[in-house]
Image (spheres, rainbow, N blue to C red):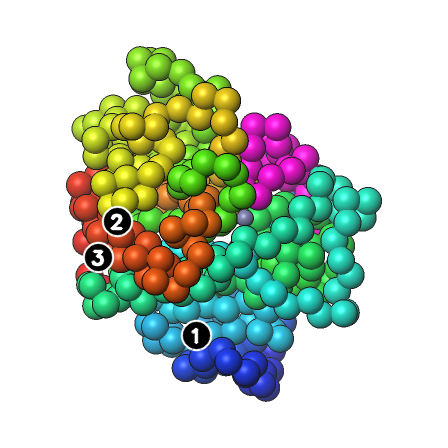
Amino acid sequence: MRFLPRPAPRPRAGTPRTGRHRTFLLTLAVAGVTAGAAACGGSDAAAPTPPTAPTTPVVPPAPTVYVAGQSYFGRNNYVEYLAGNAPVILTAPHGGALTPSGIPDRTAAACGGSATTVTDANTADLARVMQARFAARFGSYPHVVISHLSRRKLDPNRLPLEAACGNATAAEALGEWHGFIELAKSAVLKSHGKGWYMDMHGHGHAVQRLELGYMLTDALLDGSDAALDATSAAENLSSILTLSQLSPLSFSALLRGPASLGTLYAAQGFPSLPSSNDPRPAGADYFTGGENTRRHTCGAGAASVGGVTGGTICGVQIEANFTGVRDTPANRERFGDATAVVLEQYLRTHWALRMTP
Ligand SMILES: [Zn+2]
């Protein structure tokens, strides 16, 4: 892999630019199989076949120093990395608005899959605000990676062929996307030894609640606690595998007990599935978790797509409802504040992880 420094891109109007700009040229392996994914962030009907050659991440050249809270950009400002120093990584793959004419629109015919192009409205800003509110509370910054390309041009939550549709420029941005996430993961492991990843999305389902995707099917979540805990099968599949193995709580308690992420969010005024009061999809629309969550957390599927099964970065996909979470600046701040409270409690309790730098 080689890297060529390039001139700093021209900042776009209205977007804060506080950091140094750096771009990278990469050699990218775009290969794999077509996923049948039809959803925003994974659904039961969309169980993909693991690819044989996941996207090669772009790793910035050493000895680049990243300053927590500042922004860094890939080529053409398509991918933004807000550097962090907390053990938390937030990503927003579907909130982008850029539609460069040089990248053809993704279509099902060309890309395979369903070529979903709907934007998860306001999720780029949501991730940015989540970082800011977290920093206001703890003085430490989660790492944040944002795709500014419209989903018509790139879907970073898909396997390479469906994500970039064979376009070299889009594929390069996809490489930068995973590269910045890998950079963040390395920084988290170096500073804290373990960490927490959340891929932020927005759903359009009728029920206004957070859908927490642990890479578990509706059928598994519809089962009883006893069934979930009877063997390690569901735990192994989940995006909290390593955390669960180290926790004295049962797997089902971590998913929907009093100290689960969903129950903690609900206590802050953000109803969630799964949680104590809302433990099962039971036939309702629900996203189980997509390719980013598969790759960048610790479950059984990670290794086949370039991640680390049984590693010490676990996490979850959050599909946020619109009303009350993403719709207004005030609600995005409210959700950011709640997330800081929830993660501090959840990660201290289950993962012995402190939010300080
Ligand atoms: Zn999405």
- Residue drawn at (50%, 37%) of the image: 206
Mark 3 crowdedness (10 Å alpha carbons): few <14, some 14-19, many ≥20: many
Amino acid at pointer 1: Ser
Residue annotated with mark 3: 355
Residue annotated with mark 2: 343
Q: How many marks?
A: 3
Residue annotated with mark 1: 71
**Is label 1 in a helix, a strand or a loop?**
strand
Q: Which residue is more in the foreground, 354 or 254?
A: 254
Q: Earlier in the sequence, mark 2 or mark 3?
A: 2
In this view, 237 is above or below 344: above
Position of 36 with respect to 179 (left or right) is: right
In this view, 252 is above or below 21: above
Residue 101, label in figure:
none
The quarter of the picture where residue 252 lies is top left
- Residue 296 visible, this orientation: no
Residue 29 falls inside the magenta stretch:
yes
Mark 2 crowdedness (10 Å alpha carbons): few <14, some 14-19, many ≥20: many
Q: Earlier in the sequence, mark 1 or mark 2?
A: 1
- Residue drawn at (37%, 59%) of the image: 332
- Residue drawn at (67%, 46%) of the image: 116
- Residue 282 rendering spot, x and y as whole percentages: 45, 21
**Is label 3 in a helix, a strand or a loop?**
loop
Give yes or no for contact between labels 2 and 3 (Cβ–Cβ under 8 Å).
yes
Q: Earlier in the sequence, mark 3 or mark 1?
A: 1
In this view, 261 is above or below 179: above
Amino acid at pointer 3: Met
The residue segment tinted magenta is 26-52
